[in-house]
Image (cartoon, rainbow, N blue to C red):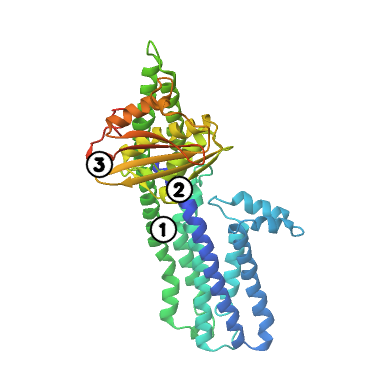
């Protein structure tokens, strides 16, 4: 089944949400359990050993629940003497809708905790308010633990689906729990009768709210999974549009030049460099999970792609800090995709060990300027019109965009080459090749 189908998306969303909900639930139960320990301060001294022993069961069960959800928790359990089988059992039941030892332990611990306040053998000497508060804490503890069982991600698992009996049991959990609470909260003794009747009714009926929580959880899962599917589909279409508009255009022109009766090798090399930059950018965008939007892209992103595509790790290539913040329109970005790798490549071929790049947008009319300064042997002005260099074709293309390519020797050695062209905002969507942008 494809991973973007809604049922699989529901399971993935349940896993992501379930982990956070379970951890939050553990902390909530820890707070409730702490409240029950505090009630021991109002119990007679001779009842404290029994009360502590009963609360220790819930405490140990809660620690198992924490170990189940905290990374590395099961490893800690496995290192304890004689707990290897328990750790394996907890690992095997993780992510499944089934009955496990931690769940049974929490149920037993909650029952023993509640029996301190009501039931057949409650502690008799205790203020009524403390008894009611302790009982509410114990029932709330149990309520929260059972809630985790009702919305456990295992119910939505594809690898280990719940059996028919377990699915029926899921629907019956609220009713069974409500029946157990009603039975436990009956006034079995005169001490039990001290708990107000309205509180008994509210606590006994509280498990029925699980149906509402369950329905809300399912709605959230379905909405999240549908939203994820729609976002993925939209991202795929945007990615396809970007691939079609950038990679295909470059390859189409490359094919035309290769099939020419007298192919221009420098133009082919230039197009190959451009294709490497585009493919490298495309890879980064796929890994990053986004595609270039309608506003174009930043010069810093393009500069990183140029460096990776040209393999210029042994040459000091630095982009001016202010230039890194410049954003280019879609068409200007496409032009820069060819200009930058060409100029940097020529500087490296001329023996440069240091290349400094600068890009700016401004002026009236608005122009884009790309400047490459290097410390290599450099090229002569005649090289710009030499048919054996890629700069000849590049200069011709820039001229079509009301631009130019200038070559100036540096006083300290090396060369500064400046490419400029009219910003695309006033010239329409045509790119450097004369092809429409994407």
Query: Which mark is nearer the camera, 2 or 1?
Result: 2
Q: In which quadrant is the C terminus drawn?
A: top left
Q: Which residue is mark 1?
A: 214
Residue that protrudes farthest toward the front in the picture:
411
> Which type of secondary structure does the marked residue at label 1 adopt?
helix
Note whether residue 25 is visible.
yes
* Res 55 quadrant in image: bottom right
Label located before the other in sequence (3 or 2): 2
Secondary structure state at the residue bearing disc 2: loop
Residue at mark 3 to residue at mark 2: CA–CA distance: 24 Å
Distance Cα–Cα, label 2 vs label 1: 56 Å
Q: Nearer the viewer, residue 106 or 32?
A: 32
At which x and y percent is residue 227? 36, 48
Query: Does residue 1 appear in this view?
Result: no
Q: Position of residue 403 (x, y in %)?
A: 30, 35
- In this view, the mark in front (1 or 3): 3
Taking the spot 71% from the left edge, 53% from the top edge, the residue there is 85
Q: Are marks 1 and 3 in contact (CB under 8 Å)?
A: no
* Image position of 386 (left or right of 183): left
Q: Which residue is mark 2?
A: 320
Mark closest to the chain's N terminus, 2 or 1: 1
State the residue at coordinates (55%, 65%): 26
For residue 297, side relative to residue 34 (left or right): left
């Amino acid at each position: 089944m494809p991973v973007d189908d809604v049922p699989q998306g529901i399971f993935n969303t349940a896993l992501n949400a379930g982990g956070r909900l379970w951890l939050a639930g553990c902390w909530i139960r820890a707070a409730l359990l702490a409240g029950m320990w505090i009630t021991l301060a109002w119990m007679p001294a001779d009842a404290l050993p029994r009360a502590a022993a009963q609360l220790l069961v819930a405490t140990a069960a809660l620690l198992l629940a924490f170990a189940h959800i905290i990374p590395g928790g099961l490893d800690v359990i496995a290192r304890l003497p004689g707990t290897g089988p328990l750790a394996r059992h907890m690992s095997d039941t993780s992510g499944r809708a089934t009955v496990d030892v931690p769940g049974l332990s929490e149920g037993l611990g909650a029952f023993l905790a509640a029996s301190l306040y009501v039931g057949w053998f409650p502690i008799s000497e205790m203020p009524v308010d403390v008894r009611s508060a302790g009982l509410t804490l114990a029932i709330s503890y149990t309520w929260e633990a059972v809630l985790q069982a009702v919305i456990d991600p295992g119910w939505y698992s594809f690898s280990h689906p719940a059996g028919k009996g377990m699915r029926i049991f899921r629907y019956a959990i609220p009713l069974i729990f409500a029946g157990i609470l009603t039975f436990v909260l009956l006034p079995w003794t005169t001490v039990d009768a001290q708990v107000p009747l309205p509180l008994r009714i509210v606590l006994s009926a509280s498990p029925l709210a699980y149906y509402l929580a369950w329905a809300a959880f399912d709605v959230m899962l379905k909405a999240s999974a549908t939203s994820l599917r729609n976002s993925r589909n939209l991202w795929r279409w945007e990615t396809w549009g970007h691939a079609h508009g950038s990679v295909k255009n470059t390859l189409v022109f490359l094919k035309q030049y290769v099939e020419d009766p007298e192919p221009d090798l420098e133009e082919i090399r230039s197009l190959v460099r451009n294709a490497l930059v585009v493919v490298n950018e495309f890879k980064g965008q796929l890994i990053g999970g986004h595609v270039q939007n309608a506003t174009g892209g930043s010069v810093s992103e393009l500069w990183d792609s140029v460096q990776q595509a040209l393999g210029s790790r042994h040459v000091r290539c630095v982009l001016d800090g202010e230039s890194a913040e410049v954003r280019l329109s879609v068409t200007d970005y496409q032009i820069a995709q060819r200009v930058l790798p060409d100029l940097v490549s020529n500087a490296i071929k001329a023996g440069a060990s240091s290349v400094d790049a600068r890009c700016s947008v401004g002026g009236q009319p608005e122009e884009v300027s790309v400047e490459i300064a290097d410390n290599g042997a450099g090229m002569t002005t005649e090289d710009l019109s030499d048919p054996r260099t890629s700069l000849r074709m590049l200069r011709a293309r820039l001229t079509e965009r009301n631009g130019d390519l200038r070559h100036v020797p540096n006083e300290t050695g090396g060369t500064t080459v400046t490419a400029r062209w009219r910003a695309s905002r006033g010239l329409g969507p045509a790119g450097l090749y004369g092809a429409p942008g994407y």
